[in-house]
Amino acid sequence: MATRPKHKRFFSIDDVGAHFGLSLVDMGVMAAEGQLRLSVPVAGLRVEIGDWEEDGDGHGFRIPAGYRMLNGLVDLYPVDGWTILRNGTGVVHALPTEGAGYTSIETGNPDQEGLLVTRDELGVRREEWRRLEAQDGDHEAEADAPARSRRGVQPTHDWDAARLEACRLFYFEGVPESQAALIRHMQTWFASKGLKVPDDSTLKRRLRDVWAMFGPEAKKRAA
């Protein structure tokens, strides 16, 4: 195998697939489940940043804090990475943000709301590449080791599966009319799987970034 350039910072989807033996479907599933952090290079990308607040009725609204110009590599939400891998192209409207804030893409072009990204532009950062290599090594070690019982406190809810279900709902059935409708759908989904049903506040917190991305679309449809 050819030696990777020492200072290479970005590996394309083709690099990832060839090196780790993954198909586009494999990578799409991993991206949707948050197991593969996809990135895309940008130059002069204008974004609005700010925080989310809630009114007394539980409705979220934005508190803008200003604008920034992004250059270099930016990470994508799992659902955006999955959509682009699956369809070949996709329009990205927002970028992941730590905490309760938001990062919204502002193109200034009314005919193109969001950033158009093609599959060929997708890839992973060097840090993500190394994480995948380390994970591969861990899996090989586990396969050779005797089975061990899992220790520690296990999570009450499978949030990776829940977020994937929310992505499936948005993509195939459309955005719910309200955040409350999304919460009701997810509670029904948990119950249908025979799983413990989270309370409203927990679901709002866990799915806040997902709704922040797709909620505005629901308002456009209702207008």
Image: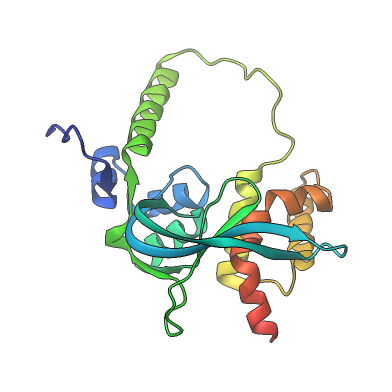
10 left or right, relative to 194: left
Number of on-image labels: 0
Coordinates of residue 128 in the picture (x, y in percent):
38, 38
Q: Nearer the viewer, residue 59 or 107?
A: 107
Colour logic = rainbow
Furthest residue in direction left, as rendered? 2
Q: Quadrant of the C terminus?
A: bottom right
User: Residue at coordinates 68% horizontally, 78% vertically from top-left?
Assistant: 219
129 left or right, relative to 171: left
Coordinates of residue 173 in the picture (x, y in percent):
62, 72
Furthest residue in direction top, as rendered? 146
Q: Quadrant of residue 108?
A: bottom left
User: Residue at coordinates 65% horizontally, 83% vertically from top-left?
Assistant: 221
Coordinates of residue 153 in the picture (x, y in percent):
71, 23
User: Residue at coordinates 42% horizontally, 25% vertically from top-left?
Assistant: 139
Q: Quadrant of residue 127?
A: top left
User: Residue at coordinates 57% horizontally, 70% vertically from top-left?
Assistant: 172
Q: Nearer the viewer, residue 134 or 149?
A: 134
